[in-house]
Image (cartoon, grey):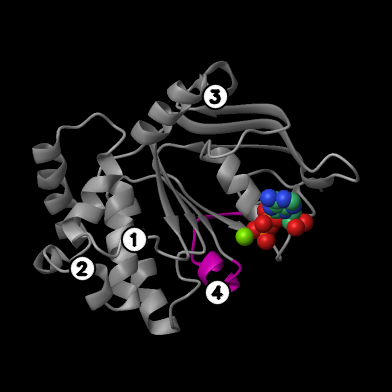
Amino acid sequence: MTDTTVLELDGVTKEYGEQAPVHALRGVSFSVRQGEMVAIVGQSGSGKSTLLHIMGTLDRPTSGVVRIDGVDAARLDDREISSLRAHKIGFVFQQFFLAEHATVRENVADGLLYAGVPATERLQLAELALQRVGLADRADFTPGTLSGGQRQRVAIARAIVGQPAVVLADEPTGSLDSTTGASIMDLIRDLNDSGTTIVMITHDMTLADQLPRRVRLLDGQIVSDSDRQEPT
Ligand code: ADP
Ligand code: MG
């Protein structure tokens, strides 16, 4: 791990709706250093997915600051934000979101679609990413021929193909059986061991307990962060 901060939130709030707004986030501040692996935990409705979307610049906060690799996202227009996201962030979701009619290789290459990488190079890099997740032999298959665990490996390959500053994962094992989930966790840990910065949402405490840092959300606020000195 280094001292370089790749992701920083300062006083982030998020309200949904105008009349009787839902306060999904109520002043969240925390930062992630390069090489870290962080679990975000908390019960359903505590704001985990909202936080992930805002960290990933898929959504803008109502107030507060989001910095990705030192860049204040609020200062960027939509086109610049898309570019920042394409270069700096990889996403993994519970529901893999693969294109069913494209090959596994094309699905992974699509992770570079908005990063300005030429097509031939996209496919070559996809090949390398598939090797990292142990699916090089499935490159020409379509997702429909794969198991759930393999599909999530494809989604992970797509997330890491551009070597993003941070990978954000929302319940990556949430729709897998426990054995498959454990193997996906092993993969995620391997990626982290080789330097990938990872923030992972989970409501599985057994999984979270295996991670070096846990941030707990409750009603849109951080109530504990194992990295931080707890008040005594
Ligand atoms: P979690 O991922 O921890 O289950 P969410 O971030 O999905 O929590 O939701 C936090 C709160 O914000 C919940 O009360 C939820 O109903 C609300 N919420 C989330 N997304 C929206 C939305 N698009 N519109 C309105 N309310 C939302
Ligand atoms: Mg959620």
Q: Looking at the picture, tell me which residue is in the foreground, 129 or 81.
A: 81
The reply to whether dot 4 and dot 1 touch (C-beta < 8 Å) is no
Mark 3: which secondary structure? helix
Residue 46 bears which disc, if any?
A: none
Q: CA distance from mark 3 to mark 2?
A: 36 Å
Say what amino acid the circle numbered 4 marks: Thr
The residue depicted at 34 percent of the width and 46 percent of the height is 196
Identify the mark nearer the N-term, 3 or 1: 3
**Region rendered in magenta:** 203-215
- Disc 3/disc 4 C-alpha distance (Å): 34 Å
Give the spatial CA distance, label 2 vs label 1: 9 Å
Q: Residues within 10 Å of mark 4 (few under 14, many from 20)?
A: few
Q: Nearer the viewer, residue 104 or 72?
A: 104
Which residue is at the front of the view, 33 or 70?
A: 70
Q: Which residue is mark 1?
A: 98
- Does any portion of residue 193 appear in the rendered image? no
Mark 1: is the Cβ under 8 angstroms from ligand 2? no
Dot label at residue 206: 4
Is label 4 or label 2 in front?
A: 2
Tell me the residue at 9%/45% (across/down). Answer: 124
Q: How many marks?
A: 4
Residue that carries the numbered disc 3 in the rendered image: 73
Residue type for callout 2? Thr
Q: Is residue 72 magenta?
A: no
